[in-house]
């Protein structure tokens, strides 16, 4: 808890608020960005006071404040645990948010609104439905026509694929979850990138994997030698990578490293899970490297992907591409989870994929425009921040001018901007020098968000300089 709280002293306006209020605000911040889950028991007041080096009165007052705002519930003898205050709801990001935040510019979610083709596709799908109504409608591996359409897209990208090699899932997230259920027993070593996609970390935590990381450089991306050395040293059961416009850094893995990575995974007996969520979204017309699966001669590579980024997240359509026997095993496992994906949504997906050229071209154009607007706003309002300009995807990983990401996110919330602070993308509370900025909202909203962030960034400096302390960790 003390480690999570980190520099809780350095909240904006800190010079005006007493210690207990700053501590309570920091706990609320951790709850809001998901690092402190709901229903978690907080340490006893005396223990936390000791770990933070403050008086017990301060912690008592902070806990009282959290109880008053509805963030904490206490019962004598049972302790205090985190709760959701009245007037709040769980947002699409899975995090909690005030009920009345219609004006909030949400930069916490990196996904776009639906394309105009969606409603006509849904109507056409409804017309197709009668063909399926005579059966029970359970298709654990997915509808044949959707599996064929997805397989054809892989084949067109240069990796021959049959419909038997495709399992349709409820989004890329379920694809990852199913693969982990099959391949990662509790305590098994798993290698991930750092930073990485937070919900992948959540899926790994649910399987109680033993996670180690390969650090990506914000400017240069993967260090091939270090990545392969990490594989050789940890010999993980599974490695999870996002080679196309990595979330959050936006880097694209070069072909040569793809090939070496597959060879190294084969040598170490590692299953390589390749998340291709952003593969449809190169934004500058550059040629894409071949899919990682092209280099796979020993069925070491499992590719996962979906329609959330180029089409619409609300469809909940994703897939696994693997060997046909592995797909069968995943389908059998999936019956124990949710039986099958909805027939109607799969039919909508078939219609959308049939128009992929038009829909994806429009999406790329829109994202390129928004990315450039975001970069322009950053250069104007926050020129001291450094950003690698991604050639695709939907996110920018901005390097801040200090380790202020959590404090900045808390301050931004007060001016109506929700941010995903750097530490959300790692494991150990580091990455405070970074913030992820998606460019999926309209350009005007992005510019306004950066203007507001810049205003609170400058307020952070006016707050009293925090005395840096290294908080003790408590078990
Ligand atoms: C890298 C990555 N994987 C998976 C997902 C989840 O995608 P889906 O909506 O298809 O479950 C996302 C969504 O943000 C993502 O960025």
Image (cartoon, rainbow, N blue to C red):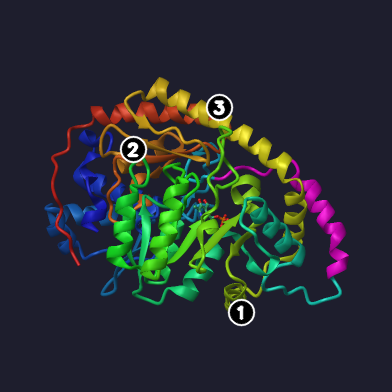
The residue where tag 1 is placed is: 332
Distance between the alpha carbons at the discs numbered 3 and 1 = 47 Å
Could you tell which of marks 1 and 2 lies nearer the N-terminus?
Answer: 1
The residue where tag 2 is placed is: 408
Q: Nearer the viewer, residue 184 or 67?
A: 184
The residue where tag 3 is placed is: 444
- In this view, 165 is above or below 57: below
Could you tell which of marks 2 and 3 lies nearer the N-terminus?
Answer: 2
Q: Secondary structure at mark 3?
A: helix
Which residues lie in the magenta part? 111-132
Name the residue rendered at 83%, 69% in the picture: 132
Q: Cβ(mark 3) to ligand 1 < 8 Å?
A: no
Could you tell which of marks 3 and 1 lies nearer the N-terminus?
Answer: 1
Name the residue rendered at 45%, 46% in the picture: 253
Quadrant of the drawing holding the C terminus: bottom left
Q: Is residue 30 magenta?
A: no
- In this view, 298 is above or below 200: below
Dot 2: within a 10 Å radius of its alpha carbon, few (fewer than 14), some, or many (20 or more) residues?
Answer: many
Distance between the alpha carbons at the discs numbered 2 and 3 = 21 Å
Q: Secondary structure at mark 1?
A: helix
Q: Cβ(mark 2) to ligand 1 < 8 Å?
A: no
Magenta span dominant secondary structure = helix
């Amino acid at each position: 808890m003390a480690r999570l709280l980190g520099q809780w002293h350095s909240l904006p306006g800190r010079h005006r608020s007493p210690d207990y209020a700053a501590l309570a605000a920091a706990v609320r911040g951790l709850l809001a960005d998901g690092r402190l889950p709901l229903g978690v028991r907080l340490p006893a007041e005396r223990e936390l006071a000791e770990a933070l080096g403050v008086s017990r009165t301060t912690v008592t007052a902070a806990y009282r404040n959290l109880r008053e705002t509805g963030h904490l519930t206490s019962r004598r003898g049972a302790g205090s645990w985190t709760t959701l205050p009245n007037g709040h709801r769980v947002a699409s990001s899975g995090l909690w948010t005030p009920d009345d935040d219609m004006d909030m510019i949400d930069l916490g979610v990196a996904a776009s609104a639906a394309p105009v083709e969606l409603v006509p596709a849904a109507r056409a799908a409804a017309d197709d439905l009668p063909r399926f109504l005579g059966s029970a409608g359970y298709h654990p591996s997915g509808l044949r026509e959707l599996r064929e359409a997805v397989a054809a897209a892989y084949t067109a990208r240069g990796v021959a694929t049959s419909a038997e090699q495709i399992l349709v899932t409820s989004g890329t997230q379920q694809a990852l979850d199913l693969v982990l259920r099959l391949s990662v027993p509790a305590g098994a070593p798993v290698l991930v990138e750092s930073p990485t996609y937070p919900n992948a970390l959540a899926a790994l935590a649910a399987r109680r994997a033993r996670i180690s990381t390969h650090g990506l450089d914000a400017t240069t991306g993967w260090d091939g030698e270090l990545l392969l050395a990490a594989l050789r040293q940890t010999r993980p059961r599974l490695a999870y990578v996002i080679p196309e416009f990595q979330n959050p850094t936006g880097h694209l893995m070069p072909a040569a490293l793809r090939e070496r990575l597959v060879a190294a995974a084969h040598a170490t007996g590692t299953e390589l899970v390749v998340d291709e969520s952003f593969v449809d979204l190169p934004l500058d017309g550059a040629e894409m490297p071949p899919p990682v699966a092209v280099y796979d001669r020993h069925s070491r590579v499992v590719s996962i992907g979906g329609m959330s980024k180029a089409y619409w997240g609300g469809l909940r359509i994703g897939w696994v591409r693997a060997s046909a026997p592995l797909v069968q095993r995943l389908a059998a496992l999936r019956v124990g989870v949710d039986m099958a994906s909805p027939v109607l949504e799969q039919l909508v997906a078939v219609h959308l994929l049939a128009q992929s050229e038009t829909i994806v071209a429009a999406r790329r154009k829109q994202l390129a425009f928004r990315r450039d607007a975001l970069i322009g706003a950053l250069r104007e309002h926050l020129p001291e921040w450094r950003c690698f300009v991604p050639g695709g995807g939907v996110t920018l990983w901005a390097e801040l001018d200090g380790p202020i990401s959590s404090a900045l996110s808390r301050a931004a919330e007060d001016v109506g901007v929700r941010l995903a602070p750097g530490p959300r993308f790692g494991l150990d509370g580091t990455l405070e020098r970074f913030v992820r900025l998606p460019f999926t909202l309209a350009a005007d909203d992005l510019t306004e968000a950066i203007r507001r962030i810049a205003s609170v960034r400058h307020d952070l400096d006016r707050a009293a300089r925090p005395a840096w302390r290294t908080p003790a960790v408590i078990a």
